[in-house]
Amino acid sequence: MYADWYDHTVTVETVGASGDWGAVTTTTHSGVPCMVESTEAVVISPEGSEVRATSVLYAAIPDRDKFTPGSQVTLPDGRKALVLSRDSTDSDPDLGGITVHLA
C-alpha cells in the first residue's frame, strides 16, 4: 500500500478556474500526506514546453485534484515548488497513487 510510504506532509495552494473577471481562484490544503524525492527529470509543461523538474512527489489518488498544474506546493523544508505535471500510477485508491513533478 503506497500510503505507508507517505512520511511527509505538504501545503498545496491549488489553482482553480478563472472567475468572471479573469481572476484565478486558489484553495489552500494543509497537511497533505505524501513522499517527496529530490530528483531531476525533463517533463512537458501545461504549455507544451520541456521543463526540468527538480522534485517528485507521490500522493494518494483522492488528493489528485489538489495538485493541478500551476499550483504551488510548500515542501517539508519550507521551499516552494510549482506543480508541472501529475500522473496516476494506479486506478485503485487504496493501492495506487499519483506522481507529481515539481519545479
Image: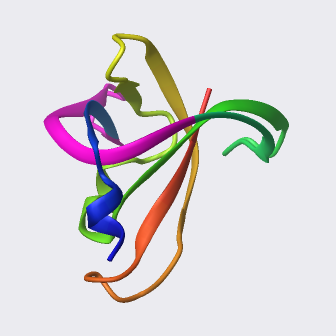
In which image quadrant can residue 61 be found? Answer: bottom left
> With 75 as the anchor, is 20 left or right in this view?
left
Residue 41 located left or right of residue 36:
right
The residue that appears at 28% across and 44% down in the rendered structure is 7
Q: Is residue 34 magenta?
A: yes
Q: Magenta residues, as a range?
A: 16-37
At horizontal 51% and vertical 27% (from top left) the residue drawn is: 82
Determine the residue positioned at 36% across, 69% down.
2
Q: Position of residue 15 (x, y in %)?
A: 35, 36
In the visual, does 59 lie left or right of 20? right
Where, quadrant-wise, is the C terminus in this rendering? top right
Quadrant position of residue 47: top right
Residue 45: % across, % down: 71, 42
Along the line of sight, which residue is nearer the eye, 47 or 5? Answer: 5
Q: Quadrant of the N terminus?
A: bottom left
Point out residue 4 in the picture as x, y percentages from the top left corner: 27, 63
